Image: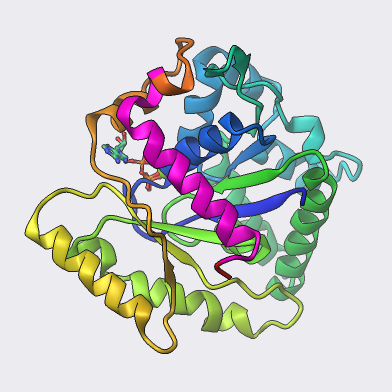
Amino acid sequence: MKGKVIAVANMKGGVGKTATVIGLAEALAAEGSEVLVIDLDPQANASICLAGSKMLKELIENGHTVDGYLTDRLFRKKDDIEFADCIRTHVSNVYHLNAQLPISLLASSSELRIVERDMLYRLSKSHTDIDWFVDRLHDLLRDQLKRTRKSYDYILFDCAPGISLLTEMSIRLANLVIVPTIPDFLSTYGLQTFCSNLRTGEMAKRTTLEKPKKPYVLVTRLRPINEHRHTVERLENEHLKDKPNFRLFETQIPERAAIAEALGKVDSWPSFSQKWKDTAGILESLSNETREALHGARS
Ligand SMILES: Nc1ncnc2c1ncn2[C@@H]1O[C@H](COP(=O)(O)OP(=O)(O)OP(=O)(O)O)[C@@H](O)[C@H]1O
Ligand SMILES: [Mg+2]
């Protein structure tokens, strides 16, 4: 089935959202799937990891970014501009079985922060009803995803930390929401609230918007220390409860130098296994579980 949408999000910063997006995108692509990554974070970390510095500079200069798209569509009223006009195909610098991984990118830039702020500023200045605008943004993104998903097997959103309007929309429109979480006290502190808010917060009452699916927590940056072991046990117990707020991936991503180093390999041409070294197998198991979660076996 074409065009499954995956949002990778967590309120908390630095928990491995971008690492998950890049690793999962490359593992899915290495298995032959066409993958699109949409970067919704003004830090543009997924964009730089995938496009490298030269290509990203060119995309930003040409306005071929999420913020470029939103500015044209919402502020310059260019009604015919599509995601496809801003997507860069064949971005990956990674090879597998002698072929470039089939990954495309809708990049982001630091301007996205300004665009998101300007949206709210313009709304309040023009006394526009926020609910009307939220519906419009939701319909716009849903429509663009509908047009885009035909060309891809998987579309992954890399969300910024926090819960911006764009993050909320991507979560609502996703077939699968992955919440990467470091298994320690602070990283899991707001997890329950984040997961339940997705389904019960103010916006959840709006019947015009899609209802978010129950999120899947992915343990990331796992270290062999008691704090992490105990927190994983707690997460496993939570998820076995009668009505858990989240599901839990069996795959766990360990804290490994190989993963941090892989994310830094932006301007070289490694193979998938050279890039991820001994963590390549873990990414393959994450991609298998993701397919299972999306195609029904575990939903
Ligand atoms: N499994 C891992 N092992 C070792 N280092 C990791 C791992 N996952 C992520 N990192 C490193 O931790 C840092 C944060 O990771 P990442 O950028 O993926 O988190 P994030 O949740 O996307 O952050 P942000 O909230 O700022 O977007 C990065 O420097 C990355 O290289
Ligand atoms: Mg990130």
User: In the current view of this chain or complex, which residue is farthest to the left?
Assistant: 226
User: How many numbered marks appear?
Assistant: 0
What is the magenta range? Answer: 274-297
Residue drawn at x 54%, y 16% is 93
Could you say where residue 125 lies in the image, as x and y percent from the top left?
68, 63
270 left or right of 209 in image? left
Could you say where residue 83 lies in the image, as x and y percent from the top left?
78, 39
What secondary structure predominates along the stretch shown in magenta?
A: helix
Residue drawn at x 57%, y 57% is 292
Q: Which of 27 and 35 is in front in this view?
A: 27
Q: Which scheme is used to colour this image of the protein?
A: rainbow
Compared with residue 197, is residue 223 higher up or lower down, i.e. above or below? above
- 291 within the magenta span: yes
Q: Inspect this view and state whether residue 105 appears.
A: yes
Could you say where residue 63 lies in the image, as x and y percent from the top left?
70, 28
When asked about the image quadrant of residue 104, the answer is top right
Q: Nearer the viewer, residue 130 or 220?
A: 220
32 left or right of 249 in image? right
Dividing the image into four equal quarters, which quarter contains ligand 1? top left
When asked about the image quadrant of residue 296, the answer is bottom right
- 166 within the magenta span: no
User: In the current view of this chain or complex, which residue is farthest to the bottom?
Assistant: 242
Residue drawn at x 73%, y 31% is 87
Q: Quadrant of the C terminus?
A: bottom right
Compared with residue 296, is residue 26 higher up or lower down, i.e. above or below? above
Q: Inspect this view and state whether residue 44 appears.
A: no
151 left or right of 211 in image? right
Compared with residue 130, is residue 281 higher up or lower down, i.e. above or below? above
Could you say where residue 7 lies in the image, as x and y percent from the top left?
56, 54
